[in-house]
Image: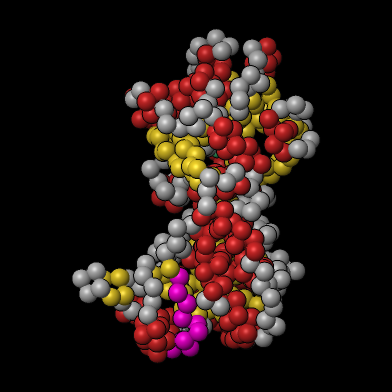
Amino acid sequence: MKYIFVTGGVVSSLGKGLTAASIGALLECSGLRVAFKKFDPYLNVDPGTMSPFQHGEVYVLDDGAETDLDLGHYERFTHAELTKLSSCSSGRIYETILRRERAGDYLGGTVQVIPHVTDEIKCRFTTSDADADVTIIELGGTVGDMEGMPFLEAMRQFALEIGRSNTIFIHVVLLPYVRTADEIKTKPAQQSVALLLGLGIHPDILACRTERKMTDEVRAKLSLFCNVPIPGVIEELDVESIYEVPGMLHDEGVHHIVLEHFGLAVRNCDLSPWTDVVKKIRAPKKRVPIALVGKYVEHKDAYKSIHEALVHGAITNGLSLEVVRIDGEVAQQEDIRGLLRECSGIIVPGGFGNRGIEGILRAIGYAREQRLPFFGICLGMQLAVIEFARNVANLREANSTEFDEKTPYPVVSLLDEQRRAVDKGGTMRLGSYECHVAPNTHLQQAYGCEFIHERHRHRYEVNGAYRNIFTAHGLCISGTHASGLVEAIELPNHPWFVGIQAHPEFKSKPHMPHPLFKEFIRAADVYPC
Ligand code: GLN
């Protein structure tokens, strides 16, 4: 197994995750099998309890692991199989060690960052897909952060132990452009590399994030002062679409450097899936305006996977996506018709807590009445059920017990066994579940099969006690779990009104768009705008 370590310098939010994912894509195009790992220095045990406002979306894997959104990039860009072992925080490392310490496993020894924490980290570098040729390991945060130190030390030791020819270090840095001097500056990158060198890590590749093209002079300067041969100084320009990054890194020859470093034969890299996608992105027939009505719309990364899945749906339909972000609270106060007038479809994503709920319900009611294509995901589906209960089935005060515990019509509620469970986290339905698809439905038309598997992350369920009332009023239950739980709903006499309890956005890739996103955008495309 070969290992690629990806670190970041100068500032955060450089797109390390995208760089790592794109390198994985290039290696896959060269016929290799890749695995990924993300290490995060924060003390939360996992991102499951972290606010989407602070940390962006929680990305869920098939096995139910709640992970960092960078894992979404890895899955969108490659076919790597990710599991709960693919993501690990300092909190998780310390939790493991402290449990062991309490159990007396250290036999009275002193438990220390070095060697115990670093050993535990090293151990986790190696637990991945045994069939992979290369494991790409990304470290969150920025080199120089105090909390990242044990990880960098573990990387240094690991490289020494398994041999430098089996490990490659890629450091992603920012080259700021200073307008008054009309120059790209290399000093912060140099200083960041100096920090790494001081920790005993010598970067083999310097991926330079820059808004302007680098001159040969800048490249030569970075090479000389960062001690990286010129071909290893890679330009990573700002691009319009993230799906241009694999092609850009290909042109910079990153895969060649990696394969040569590992002593692997340089193979033909078939980049066609990526060039096809980029070609479609650059030549859309027209734009498709979609309203994203939700709770965390002002935070760019809170609905990352939803956004990307919509982009994939647009690409496959030859369209360019325009997202109109509407906060639930705004939808509550303003004229809903005015807000949605320009939109060809409405998507309501997942969320927790009751802020903005009544506004989102208004938007859903508008979509139902105006025959505007609607796609409700998780909370979005639950709200579509509540809207239907109130305004079609005449259960006026229907609600979810998440928002109103005393509602006379708890059309969305916890299951009995969940109510008995005390630990909140423990009641969450997480990970992949099978769903039976009813024939002659939009769901069936999109997926084209009888059984589907999608990832879940929610506590509340559609209350089965109301099933007959709903169907009597014309709601179609198009997806059902073997236990009888409602997995998907739709309105038969509507061009496209679909709600799903799971999160299909986690399984969409640019060249394999998720069928529901593809069909939703197709319906929006033909909506008379
Ligand atoms: N808050 C809802 C629940 O827990 C929906 C969750 C979600 O949208 N992910 O069931």
Q: Is residue 397 above or below residue 219?
A: above
Q: Between residues 387 and 275, which one lies in front from this camera angle?
A: 275
Q: Is residue 487 left or right of residue 155?
A: right
Instruction: Assign ligand 1 to one image quadrant.
Output: top right
Q: Is residue 162 above or below residue 346?
A: below
Q: How is the image coloured?
A: secondary structure
Q: Is residue 98 magenta?
A: no
Residue in the image at 62% along x and 41% along y: 518
- Whether residue 353 is visible, yes or no, is no
The percent position of residue 471, horizontal first and vertical second, equals 68, 16
Q: Is residue 240 above or below residue 529?
A: below
Residue in the image at 54% along x and 74% along y: 251
Q: Between residues 206 and 343, which one lies in front from this camera angle?
A: 343
The percent position of residue 240, horizontal first and vertical second, equals 45, 58
The percent position of residue 203, horizontal first and vertical second, equals 49, 82
- Whether residue 360 is visible, yes or no, is yes
Q: Which residues are magenta?
A: 226-236
Q: Is residue 268 left or right of residue 312?
A: right
Residue positioned most to the left: 180
Quadrant containing the N terminus is bottom right
Residue 442 lies in quadrant: top right
Residue in the image at 55% along x and 9% along y: 394
Residue in the image at 36% along x and 70% along y: 212
The percent position of residue 407, horizontal first and vertical second, equals 51, 17
Q: Is residue 234 magenta?
A: yes
